[in-house]
Image: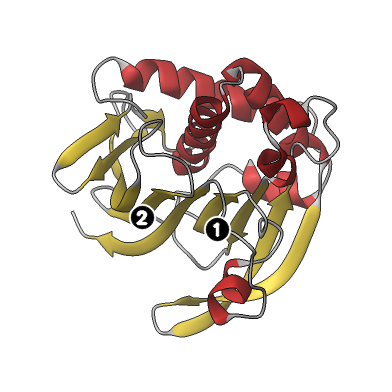
Amino acid sequence: MTGPTGRGARLGVAALALALLARGALAGEAQDRLFALGALDEVRTGETLVYDFSREGAYSGDKLDKIAHGEARLTVEPGEEAGKRAAVALVRDGDKLIANFDPFPADAGNPMFMVFMEEAVATMSKLTGGSSFYIRNRMREALGAQDAVEETTVAYEGREVPARVLTFQPFLSDRNADKMGPAFVDLTIRFTMSDEIPGEFARMEAVTGPDAAAPDAARAGGAAKPEAPPLMDLSLTLSKIEEG
C-alpha cells in the first residue's frame, strides 16, 4: 500500500479478482469458509470493525516502511442502491493514511480478506523484486487448492469461542520459489476464523523466514525459537468494534 491517492480502485479490482479466481477452483472446507458470502451480515449499518495492522520483518527499511501499530478499519454504510450496503475500508499508521479503497458490496464476504491478500502480494513483490502478477497467481492457486484446516479456540469478548485456522503455503513446491529467495519458499499464510466473531476473521497473517511454519503462540511462548527473525511478518488482527 503506497498511498491514498489513486490506489483504492486498482487495489480493489486486483484483490477482488484474486478472490473470484480462487472461487473457480474450490477444494474444500478452507475455501468454503474463506469465500463464504454473508460474513458481514451480523455487522450493523454504521458499525466499524477495527483491526490492528502490522507490517514488520528483518528487511531493510529502505525497501519498505515498517508499521508496528497500524490500523485497518472496515465500516458498513448504506449503499447507493435501496436495500444494499457497502463496506468501506481504509488503512492508516497513526494519523497517516496509508490507503483507502472504493466501497465493496457488503454482501460479498469480508473485504478485509481481499485487502490483506493484496497487501501480502505487494509487500512480497517489493521485497523480492518479483512480479506481482506471478505472486498473485501462485497465491490464488494455493487458496483454491490447499485445504489445511485445524480446530482451535480464540479469545473474544472475554471468552474462548470455537475457531478454525486455515493454512496455506503458496510457494512450497513452486519451481521458481528459489528465485525470490529461500525465505519465501516457506511463506505461510494463516487465517483464524470463527462464526461467533463479526466479520468472521479474528486474525490474518503472512509470515516467512526460518520460523514461518510455527504458529504465533509457539514463537511468542518460546516453544519454537527461530535462528533469525522472519523476513516478512504481516498481520491483521480484530481488536474492537466501534458503534456508529
SS at mark 2 in the image: strand
Residue that protrudes farthest toward the left in the picture: 95
The residues tagged by marks 1 and 2 sit, at their Cα atoms, a distance apart of: 23 Å
Q: Name the image quarter holding residue 227.
A: bottom right
Residue 41 horizontal side relative to residue 206, left or right: left
- Mark earlier in primary sequence (1, 2): 2
Specify whether residue 87 is in view.
Answer: yes
Residue that protrudes farthest toward the bottom in the picture: 159
Which residue matches tag 1?
Answer: 229
SS at mark 1 in the image: loop
In this rendering, the label closer to the viewer, 1 or 2: 1
Q: In the figure, 30 relative to 60: above or below?
A: below
Mark 1 vs 2: CB contact within 8 A: no
Q: Residue at x 24, y 25 (%)?
A: 4
Judging depth in this view, the residue of 44 and 58 nearest the camera is: 58
Q: How is the image coloured?
A: secondary structure
Instruction: Please give the label number shown on residue 82.
Output: none
Which residue matches tag 2?
Answer: 51
Q: Residue at x 72, y 71 (%)?
A: 151
Q: Quadrant of the N terminus?
A: top left
